[in-house]
Image (tube, grey):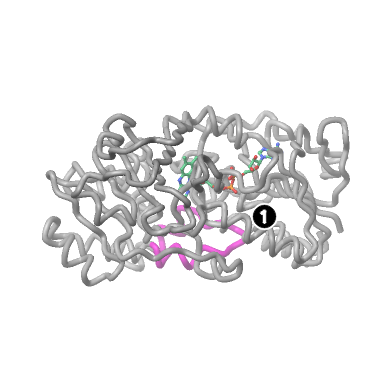
Amino acid sequence: MKALVIGAGHNGLIASYYLRKLGLDVTVLEASHRIGGMTESAVEAKAVISRASYVLGIMPESLRREFEIPIIESEIFQTIEYDGELIPFYREPRRRREVLGKYFPKFSEFEDKLFKMKEIMSWFTFTSSPPSREKILEVAEREGVPEMVKDTSAHFLKEYLPREVHRYFIYPSMEDAPAYMVAYFYNEWSLVPSGMGTIPSLIEKKARSLGVEIKTRSKVDQIVIRNGKVTGVKVGDRELKADLVVSAISPVATFSMTEPLMDLKLDPGKGGWVKYNVVFRDGVKVRDDLKPYLQGIIDLEVGEIIMPSVLDETRGAPVLEFMGDREEVLSMFSGEILYEEKITADYALRYYHAPGGNLNHLPMRYPYLFDGRPVKGWGYRTPVKGLYLSGAGTYPGGQVTGIPGYNVALAVEEDLQQGF
Ligand SMILES: Cc1cc2nc3c(=O)[nH]c(=O)nc-3n(C[C@H](O)[C@H](O)[C@H](O)COP(=O)(O)OP(=O)(O)OC[C@H]3O[C@@H](n4cnc5c(N)ncnc54)[C@H](O)[C@@H]3O)c2cc1C
């Protein structure tokens, strides 16, 4: 049985690996000349940068183990600025709570709620049928944290933390999203040696070793349907036949090239983000108070910054990656800049083929949460026989999680068992 996977982002690659394990003959088609999508390392001025995503935190341990993805576990994984001070989040829980508790007396209670919500979500991580909001609420009520589903992020945060630091726990544009999103983004973020591109490279290696074929420079223009069933895809004028197709790209793009789904309108939102990657000559000087914390993310009023080369010797030169105000951030560093780039939503549209430049393919808010992502009740399946969805635009959502890639294979497996 022949399966085509559209998109060699980390989710498409994970899907290809698990589909191959089901015994399918799998080919991945990637529009770009390279694999990885937004999980990419690049070499500039002889230094390695993580071009888009820069830290790993949401991918379940079991997937990380399966693909042998290493992480650099710094002592401090995040630092936030508050009232002119820098407050570190230590990986060691007791120390973290001790430090944070001095500034925010209800921090332990806050973190307990987040961890409880995370535990609940872990029960629904690997699934072929994403849970509904009602189901999650029922469990959250039973477990004593209904507010994580009922309240907005802004309302929940107000209970525990001063307004000034809310933005370090939820993007301001997402304050209306349920408090559950605060738990989604609260993680012990880690660097990956040689940048985020290490992740797709390792998955690719494993997938190829099983016999998965990966074709770059193969942009799919149309998903071919005959008599209500997928028969393949078109890459330019060429038609490639398949029994099933897994689309691991933005659902907005998938629908636009699938005749029966074209009228379905999804709103990818407007990506207002900007990321800078900067390579310095050796000897760059850093503002003294930042030095102890550069090993992890530093959330400042002017932006979120990290200097991965502090812990990762393979980077080749001092590298600074940040999302925020360029002048303000660079004023904290003095040294010669050898390379500098700025990427925006336009870049993601052009180079990662992500409609709206949305780095999560769809906004992380209603209606695109739980079983509403991307369309209520679909999960990884579609009304078109043989067409499946994966990627950041499906449950549980965006970021480098690998979960949609794994789960779509669960859905396919179930359907194969039922005679397809
Ligand atoms: C600046 C930035 C910073 C981020 N920071 C982080 C972070 O630190 N941590 C984190 O966890 N997440 C982060 N993210 C988000 C994260 O990178 C993405 O949500 C995640 O990588 C999405 O993975 P994916 O495999 O679902 O899709 P993608 O990475 O979007 O991959 C989809 C692939 O499909 C290909 N494609 C698209 N259309 C077609 C077509 N028609 N035919 C063939 N191929 C096609 C694309 O070229 C791409 O390679 C960041 C993203 C950005 C842009």
Name the residue: 64% across, 50% down.
Answer: 390
Q: Is residue 96 left or right of residue 319?
A: left
Q: Is residue 174 left or right of residue 71?
A: left
Between residue 62 and residue 140, name the one nearer to us.
Answer: 62
Q: Is residue 141 above or below residue 222?
A: below
Q: Secondary structure at mark 1?
A: helix
**Among the 4 quarters of the image, the one containing residue 113:** bottom left
**Among the 4 quarters of the image, the one containing residue 408:** bottom right
Q: Is residue 410 above or below residue 369?
A: below
Q: Residues in magenta?
A: 118-139
> Horizontal and vertical percent for residue 405?
63, 56
Q: Which residue is under mark 1? A: 13
> Horizontal and vertical percent for residue 296?
34, 55
Between residue 278 and residue 184, name the one nearer to us.
Answer: 278
Name the residue: 38% across, 46% down.
Answer: 282
Name the residue: 55% across, 71% down.
Answer: 65
Q: Is residue 130 magenta?
A: yes
Q: Amino acid at mark 1?
A: Leu
Does mark 1 have its CB less than 8 Å from ligand 1?
A: yes
Name the residue: 16% across, 60% down.
Answer: 106
Mark count: 1
> Horizontal and vertical percent for residue 14?
65, 58
Q: Quadrant of ligand 1?
A: top right
Q: Is residue 64 above or below residue 204?
A: below
